[in-house]
Amino acid sequence: MGVIYFKRFRMEVDLTEDLPAFELPEGFHWRAWADGLTDLHAEIKYRSFCDEVDSKVFPILGDRWGCQRLMREIRSKPGFLPEATWLIGCDRGYCATIQGIVDASGMGSIQNVAVLPAYRRLGLGKALVRKSLAGFADFGVERAMLEVTAENPHAVKLYRKLGFRKSKTTYRAVTE
Ligand SMILES: CC(C)(COP(=O)(O)OP(=O)(O)OC[C@H]1O[C@@H](n2cnc3c(N)ncnc32)[C@H](O)[C@@H]1OP(=O)(O)O)[C@@H](O)C(=O)NCCC(=O)NCCS
């Protein structure tokens, strides 16, 4: 059995400046958080992550039931913030999910950003993150963070475009 180390970046953004306006592409709509949506968020998360590098870093993301467990854990955290937790839908169903919590220090923490493969490069990832940041800001949160795997350069690029900057590098050991 071997151990692989994945480099991870913590990235942070200031929410005290005015956030740029954003819109969803035509044909898509927001669905606000409700308790009955836990499994739907989990399903979109699973189908978005199962073939991606993060399912190697966090095997739970590559497992449908694991994603359901993860969503229940996120939902039950004391700082879970419905205003930072969204689905995007279209006439063919739901296609993207994001969740946010406020940690013990008062910082917003984006949990997972996930867009189904068929709906990528349409601006949905960017819209999701902005919507979640707006939810944090409306709640009075002044700073938000997320963690991203260095081997996921498209996600790093997306976050940089939205003003996130690297604040820390960590390594996550995964047993093969
Ligand atoms: C990362 C992810 C959320 C991006 O979603 P998306 O809807 O495709 O992103 P957007 O269309 O909003 O793209 C925003 C910017 O990110 C960058 N980007 C995103 N995907 C890219 C790609 N495949 N190639 C190059 N740049 C890309 C671009 O700069 C893009 O801006 P542009 O289209 O104006 O060039 C999506 O690929 C995904 O769900 N991946 C699997 C799950 C995952 O890894 N999530 C991130 C965990 S930290």
Image (spheres, grey):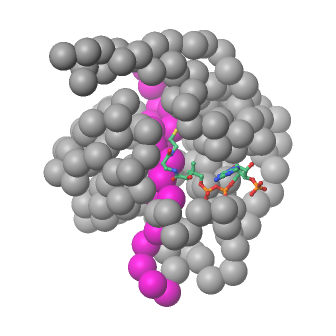
Q: Nearer the viewer, residue 5 or 39?
A: 5
Q: Residue at x 38, y 51 (%)?
A: 51
Q: Nearer the viewer, residue 60 or 112?
A: 60
Give the x, y percent position of residue 38. 28, 57
Q: Main secondary structure of the magenta part?
A: strand
Please state, as top left, top right, bottom left or bottom right, where the N terminus lies in the image.
Answer: top left
Relative to 91, does residue 118 appear above or below in the rendering? above
Write down the region rendered in magenta: 91-115
In this picture, residue 152 sits left or right of residue 16: left
Q: Residue reaching furthest bottom? A: 91
In this picture, residue 122 sits left or right of residue 60: right
Q: Which quadrant would residue 163 be assigned to in this image?
A: top right
Relative to 29, does residue 38 appear above or below in the rendering? above
Q: Which quadrant would residue 103 be assigned to in this image?
A: top left
In this picture, residue 44 sits left or right of residue 145: left
Question: Is residue 160 magenta-colored?
Answer: no
Q: Is residue 76 visible?
A: no
Q: Residue at x 30, y 61 (%)?
A: 43
Q: Is residue 173 visible?
A: yes
Q: Residue at x 61, y 42 (%)?
A: 155
Relative to 51, does residue 88 appear above or below in the rendering? below
In this picture, residue 23 sits left or right of residue 99: right
Q: How many marks?
A: 0
Q: Residue at x 50, y 48 (%)?
A: 113
Relative to 12, does residue 129 appear above or below in the rendering? below
Give the x, y percent position of residue 67. 26, 48
Give the x, y percent position of residue 114. 48, 53
Please state, as top left, top right, bottom left or bottom right, where the C terminus lies in the image.
Answer: top left
Give the x, y percent position of residue 154. 64, 43
